[in-house]
Amino acid sequence: MAKDKKQPRPKAETPKGFRDYFGQDVTERRDMLDRIAQVYHRHGFDPLETSAVETVEALGKFLPDVDRPNAGVFAWQEEAVPGGGTAGDWLALRYDLTAPLARVAAQYRNDLPSPYRRFAMGPVWRNEKPGPGRFRQFYQCDADTVGSASVAADAEICGMLADALEAVGIDRGDYLVRINNRKVLNGVLEAAQVREDQAEDVLRQIDKFDKVGREGVLALLTTGRLDDSGARIDGVGLSEAQAGPVLAFLEAKDADNAATLDNLSAAVGGSAIGAEGVDELRQIAAMLAAMGVAEDRAVIDPAVVRGLGYYTGPVFEAELTFEILDEKGRKRQFGSVAGGGRYDGLVERFTGQKVPATGVSIGVDRLLAALRAKGLAGAEVVGPVVVTVMDRDRMSDYQAMAADLRAAGIRAEVYLGNPKNFGNQLKYADKRGAPVAIIQGGDEAERGVVQVKDLILGAKIAAEASVEEWKSQPAQTEVARADLVAEVRRIIG
């Protein structure tokens, strides 16, 4: 009888588009999110955790077709298993935190307070082509108010976003929350007599204002232009007279909010929806001033055009204004780390009733990268105190030492590898980033003392000190067993 072929060993590799996060990465992200959560909590927002899995219908995606069963999302059909759903139902990993909020707001609408204010933090998944810095699993950090049509909710989100950036360490002057309004743009399109079938094309072209400037956008709105490669880009087909209000809108930013708002009023002309949008921005500016959020922290800025195709009212983004060096050593501004705005239809597709909502999403990985660029993250994580094992028959004594340290609030562990080679124990402590090693052999145990080795000082002495300095500043001291906690606390501060 032929023997079964030996199965090949699986490759120890991360799936494409995914990554692993180790101690320091996890700690830095958790600390940053904890600070943001404290700000949201102070503003009266409640935390919400939803399932990582939602129905495809709840996510708002169309049922995947036969050829692309996972288009955009990681989806699968429910099997007929005990306790499962109906066979054939499509389930998917959530691709954002907003769609689950819509489902929660509809499902628990009779139990939740209205308005409902919540924040959520967690991983989301996108079944998209990965690339440099683009992963198929990443973290989001959202805060939303559901059920309030008042622009006070938008102003609160903007002020809270500014507070959150400062809470994680971004100084005033290094960030700016920029605010615009889709209604103002609608008024501009009305004043420019833009046809409904041209509106989306106009939106796409004005989104290029930062890249191609006034003349570039004018060409794109009218007859077209050549790109950097010489290829022809067709224009929308507006006349220069029609393009005028659009350009006035994009260039309305002035020395202060009052002047900017006056310019926007002129850009929308006699449009009622445009005037409504300008009035909403005036209210937001006044409320931010009353909240102590000055114009050096949040400002009305018509140049914020991203997302205007999705949002229905105020729209905002947080931009970091300091410069960093790119991979080629060139200075560039860090850019946007958060965005949001007001949107309708959040719960409507579940209940048939419009429910106003506004919210913001912080790019977790991007903000953490900014903190590292500013030297506000990435500090060395101090490992646990390591209690070494000199006599494996006295493991209980070593565990008692670690327990005493933990009871005092000091991170500590007992070495659980093979204790035969003491050098390996110190190598382990070094790899763990341990600040201190505790040593107690049989002789020390009989005398009721322990050796406390300051590993940080020891490394510094070995690298820098002369023999005389080393003798006068020993990194290892002997103390009574009863004084162990006090000595370790003195060393680690």
Image (tube, grey):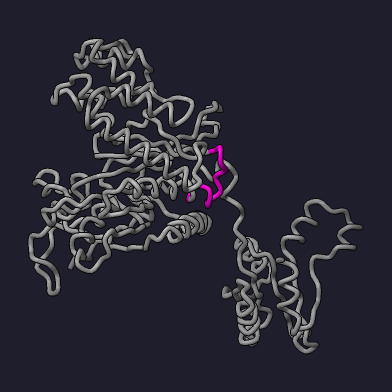
Secondary structure mostly seen in the magenta stretch? loop
Q: Position of residue 473 (x, y in %)?
A: 86, 63
Q: Is residue 258 above or below residue 360?
A: above
Q: Is residue 296 above or below residue 245?
A: below
- The quadrant in which the C terminus is found is bottom right
Q: Nearer the viewer, residue 212 or 197?
A: 197
Q: Residue at x 56, y 28 (%)?
A: 329
In the image, is 326 to the left or to the right of 313?
right
Q: Is residue 265 above or below residue 235?
A: below
Does 168 lie within the magenta span?
A: yes
Q: Nearer the viewer, residue 329 or 468?
A: 329
| Occupied quadrant, residue 283 | top left
In the displayed orientation, state which residue is furthest to the right. 468
Does 323 lie within the magenta span?
A: no
Q: Position of residue 119 (x, y in %)?
A: 36, 57
In the image, is 443 to the left or to the right of 151?
right
Q: Position of residue 452 (x, y in %)?
A: 75, 73
Q: Nearer the viewer, residue 290 or 187?
A: 290
Q: Nearer the viewer, residue 12 or 312?
A: 312
Q: Residue at x 37, y 63 (%)?
A: 46
Task: Provide the residue span drawn in magenta.
Answer: 164-174
Q: Position of residue 220 (x, y in %)?
A: 27, 16
Q: Residue at x 29, y 36 (%)?
A: 307
In the image, is 188 to the left or to the right of 488?
left
- The quadrant in which the N terminus is found is bottom left
